[in-house]
Each structure stands twice: as structure tokens, then as C-alpha cells.
Amino acid sequence: MVESLRPRRLGAMLALFAVCLSVAALAASAPVVADSHLAIEEDAVEQAHGDVAEFMLSVPQGESVAAVVDGPGGSRELNLSDASGDGRIALSINSYLAGPDATATEVYGVGDGDRLSVEGEATGRLPPGSYRIAAYADGTDSEPADTAGLTLTDRGLGNATVMVAPNGSRERLDSLAAIQRAQERRWLTPTNEVAIGDTFVLRLDVPGVAGAVANESGPTDEARFRRLLAGSNTSLLLSEQMPGPSRPRHHLSLDASNTTTVVADPDNDTYYVAADLAVLPWKYSHSLREGELSFADSPLRYGNTYVPRFLVDNRSRLNPSDISEGSRTGQFAAVGPDAVVTYPGKRDGTLQAAPSSNQVVAGWTTVAPGSTVTVELSNDEGDSFPATRTVRVVQERPPGAEGAVYRYRAEFDLSEAEPGTTFDVDIRSNGTQLNPQDSWDDGPRGFVDPTLAPTATATATPTETALPAPTGTSAQTPIATGTPTATPHADPGVTLTRSQTPTATAGTTTGDGPGFGAVAALLGSLALVAFGCLPGRRDR
């Protein structure tokens, strides 16, 4: 029986050997895929048409790479080489330069030290749409080592935001970090009104411009953005919205390097321009392109409303068509630097102050938060006068207020002032008198009102009251009674307790921006009523 099993076992072994030979043959005929470790770090990138898309390829083994871009613009093959030897290749795609007449080498680029060449006569046409980026390395066959997606969207129109900063702070807003610090410290403030003399800041959110900026020469994004603004086909203007009858509009130019500071963040399609409106070059013109710029006798006037216009390649990217229409993005009004006093309260038009310490003069001003204002109380009779305090304007507004309305608060000691005397209130900032001093309006007047003087109420003499003595006790206990003293004069909005007195809280901060005092308590109903009765601003 054993002998009979030997042929059967031999046949099984021969069959198994045949299967092994078949498997080996199939393995020999299959393509060999190299373990290249090639990868595209981004899964998908979306950019507005005109921006720059970037892909980082990881090439740790230093292979040559073939990148195929396939989509609405056709298919093109790029040969990439990690010539720098750092194991990475940065592939950039500038869709601003793309077009029917552009070559692929104009549109595509790699980082310093690496190399790129194009297979065949591929064009750089890249219309909006969805694309597939496939990367192939040495030894790969029909399947890519990695893929990524690219979406180019229609760029649309941009948006603009107007902000204001204290006078003389333009050159300090020279980086994204400086702008962020200014916003955190609350002296860079969004607004729709800008006081003449303060620093004007325009934030542009404009997709589809990054490619144009990248195409300019310069060591930094700021330098390239400035060169773009200086180009013959680009302009950034503030255009008068409603010119007077029978005259052209005047336009303030933000292109000049000696009057503006620029910050560029093309990765986020965001750009900033800071300037002093009063010194910008300007021109009169019916067209954005006509007219010559002038630096003399700026036509900027209080009450004028302006709209930003941004043209790139002579195409409007901001507020196209008729700018006289309302609700234009970035629209703002130029206003005069003014201030009003809303506290202490008035009687017959005169501020009523007490002959005591902790006397507050507070109100609203159009100058930017972070600015310093000097409040002076003066008369010709001596006593406690003149009394001067310099304080910071804070980013506090009445409920519902818009535009340039910010609070200041100064505290004075008038305890030595003679009751019944009068005084003038003068408010200045950067040498400019803020409160009106015209011939028909002498500005705020104050009166040291003797009826407001704090009077100490004498403590009542303790009175001994005979009470029935407890049983077995002959002692009698005197009970002391008295009257509390009067509540001191206080700034409305401050609630006093037994251990609390009204104090000024203005202070400064350190750093590269203007200092900032702690926000004082909100004005009460008296201040709000006074604010609602402010006179209209005047041309001077």
C-alpha cells in the first residue's frame, strides 16, 4: 500500500512546483513600482484667478519629478529637479500671468536652487476651473506617486475698510505685526469718518492681485506692492463722491511713496495703505487716468465724502461704475478736529463745577483714540487757574453712535478756587484748538458754584437716654445717634460706595504705539442728552 502512494505524492509535488513557476512568471511580468516616498503636502488648494497657488513636494530621496497639470486649460507636463538637495521642491502657479499667449515657464516656477523645464510647447493657459496635479517619480509607471487638487475661482470685486490712528503714527504702521499691536491696544479704529490731521488707514481685501504683486521686482511683499502701485496701469485713489456743480472731481492719490506707508499680505489677499490725507498729492479730473498730480494747496475740505478706487491693469477692482451711488465699500467723510464738553452739567449754558477736588471735565471728540488732548481751565484772576491736564482719548462711544465720536476725561482739583469765579475751557490736540473759539462762540465757560461746595455735617452730640434697667441691675447705657455726611460730587455713571471715590484712570502703555488710558465709566443720561444736542460741524 505504501508503494501505491508514492506515484500519487510525486504528482502532487510536481503540480505544486508548476504553480510556483506560474506565480514567479506573473511577478516577473508585473511593473516594478519604486518606493520613492514622493508626496505633495497639500491635498487641495483654492485661489482666486490672478493669485498664486503653491504646492510643496517632498522628495527625500532626491528623485527627479514629473508633475502633470490637467484641467480646463489643457494638460502640460513639468519636469522638476531638487537641485538644491534639501529634499523639497516648491512649485508655484501664477494664474495672473496665465493666458493663451503665456508660456508655461512664465506661469510655473520653483524655489531658489531647484530647476524646472517643460515637456513640449505647452502654453500657460489657466482659465477658472478645477485642476488635477499629479506627481510621478523615478521608477513609477502609469500611477502617480501622489495627487492634489487646484481650484481657480472667479476673483470678483474687492472690499475696503477705513480705519483711523492718531496724528503722526503713519510710519509706525509698517508691518502686519505693528498693525495687529495697534488694533489690540485700541488705537487703530474702524470708522466712517476721519478727522483732518489724523492718520488715515485703508485696508484692502482684494482677491486676484497677488499674482500681479509677485510679478514685480523687490526683496519684500511691501516693496513689490509699492512697485505695483507706481506702475502705469495701476492706481489707488480716493475720489470725491459728490463734486460741486460744473467742476470735475478731485482725486487724492495713495501711490506716492513719500506720503504713504504700505503693508502687504498677499497670501491672505490683504493690503494696507496709511497716509495723512492733508498732504496727499491730488488732481482734478473727470477720468481716473487724466490730469497731473499736484502737492500744493490740497482741496481737502471738512464734510467732503470720498470713495476708494483701485485699478489694476486698468481694470477696476474696487467700486466700479458710478461712485456717486451710496453704500460704496470704504466710503468715508473727512471731518474737522472738534471736541465738546458734556460734563459737568450746564446751567444757563455755563458748566457748573464745585470748589473741591475730583472735578471732572469730560466729553466727546473727533480725534482718533490713542491721541492726547490737553484740557485747560483758565481765567485772569489767579486762584487755582490755569489748571491743565493732558489725557488720552479712549475708544468709548455713546450707545448707537457712529463715525468719529470718542471720549476724553480730565480731572481737576479746584478745592482752592474762589467760589463764584468763572473760567474758560480750552481743549487742544497737536497744537490744534478743538473746541470752538469763533467770534460768535467763545467756547465753553465754567462757573465755580458755591452751592456745590461740600459741607461737612456736624456729628450730633451723643444723647444719653435713660432706659429701664434690667432686673437686678442699676446700670444705664447711653445710645449714640448721628447723621451721615453728604455724598461727594461725582461724574455720572460712577456709583460710589462708602470706600469709593471718583478718580481719573488715564494712563499710558509702553511699546511702539501711542499710550492708552483705562476706559473711564460710561457717561450718564446727562452726557448722552448733551451729545445729542451737538451742533453741526463747520467749515473753517
Image (cartoon, rainbow, N blue to C red):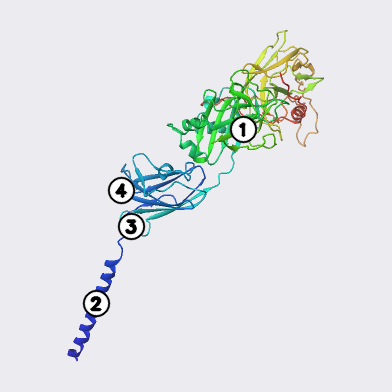
| Residue 494: x %, y % from top left | 70, 30
The Cα–Cα distance between marks 2 and 1, rounded to whole angstroms, is: 82 Å
**Helix or strand or loop: what does disc 2 sit on?**
helix
Residue on which the image places disc 4: 62
Q: In the rendered structure, are the residues bearing label 2 and label 4 in contact, judged by CB atoms less than 8 Å apart?
A: no
Q: Amino acid at mark 3?
A: Thr
User: What crowding class fits label 1: few (fewer than 14 Cα within 10 Å), some (14-19), or many (20 or more)?
Assistant: many
The Cα–Cα distance between marks 4 and 3, rounded to whole angstroms, is: 14 Å
> Is residue 114 something one can see in this rendering?
yes
Residue on which the image places disc 2: 18
| Residue 63: x %, y % from top left | 31, 50
Residue on which the image places disc 3: 140
**Helix or strand or loop: what does disc 4 sit on?**
loop
As rendered, which of 146 and 350 lies closer to the eye?
146
The Cα–Cα distance between marks 1 and 3, rounded to whole angstroms, is: 54 Å
Mark 2 vs 4, N-terminal side: 2
As rendered, which of 312 and 470 lies closer to the eye?
312
- The residue most toward the left is 3
